[in-house]
Image (cartoon, grey):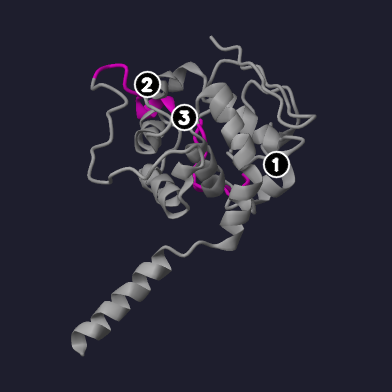
Amino acid sequence: MCFCLIFMAFSAISASAQTKHQRYLDYIERYKKVALQTERDFGVPASITLAQGLLESYVGQSKMALEANNHFGIKAYHWKGEVYGGCDSLKQVGYRKYGAPEDSFLDHAQFLKGPRYSILYQFDVYDYRSWAQGLRDCGYAEDVNYPDKLIRIIEQYELYAINGGKRMDGSMPVQASIDNDDTAPSKDRWHHRKRRNQASEPVAQQQTSSQEEPQQTFTPLRQGLVPASSDND
C-alpha cells in the first residue's frame, strides 16, 4: 500500500513537471516557420532559436516583446532603426525595435553570425546541448543557468523534433566550445550587460544579449519569410 502511494505521488510529480502549457505551444506554432527559415539561411538551430525566444520574451508577453517586437533582448548597438528604452543622458543603450516579431527572429540569427559566435557553427544543428552551453561560453548571457534553462525548454516541448532531430542523451558530455587559452572571453569584456539594478530598462532579466558586435546588415521581413544575406566581418 505504501509503495503504491509513493509510486502514484512520483508519477503525479513527473507528469506535472512535463506539463505543456498552451501559451508555450501557441508561441512555438506561431514562430516555428521563421525559426526553421533562420536555421536554413544562417545555421542557427531552430530549437535554440525557439527556446531563446520563449525564455527571453517570457513567452512573448514581456513588455519589450509586446511594445517593441523584440523577443531576444538585442540592444541598439550599431542600429539605425527605432530604439526602445534607454536614456542618452545616463548613457544607457536602448533596445532594437522592430516592425514585426519575425524581424526580431531574423535579426537574432544575423546577430549570431558575428565573429564572437563563429565557434558555435562547429556544432551540428541537432546538437542543441552544445549550442546552449556554447552561447553561455561566448558571453551571450550572464546567467550561469542559461544553458540548463534552454535545454529544459527544448526537451519539455520537444523542440529538437522541429527540424527532425532527436532528444539527446543527457549523460553525454556537452562538447567544449572554447579551448582553455587566451581566446576565452573575459568577464571584463561584457561591460555592456544589463545590471540588475537598472530597473528603468525593459525586462529580459539575466538573458540580455552581448551587443558589441561589428555592424551587420539587417533585412526586415515584409512579404512573408524572405531569405536575407548577412554581411559580416
In which image quadrant can residue 122 be found?
Answer: top left
Circle count: 3
Mark 3, other Cα within 10 Å: few <14 / some 14–19 / many ≥20: few
Mark 2, other Cα within 10 Å: few <14 / some 14–19 / many ≥20: few
Labels 3 and 2 touching (C-beta < 8 A): no
Give the left or right position of residue 49, taking residue 8 as reference.
Answer: right
On the image, numbered disc 3 is attached to which residue?
Answer: 191
Residue 188: in magenta span: yes
Going by the numbered disc 1, the residue's amino acid type is: Asn
Q: In the picture shown, does residue 31 fall above or below 79?
A: below
Residue 87 in view (yes/no): no
Question: Percent from the top left, x then y, of residue 136?
Answer: 39, 35
Give the left or right position of residue 120, taking residue 22 as reference.
Answer: left
On the image, numbered disc 1 is attached to which residue?
Answer: 69
On the image, numbered disc 2 is attached to which residue?
Answer: 122
Residue stretch in magenta: 181-209
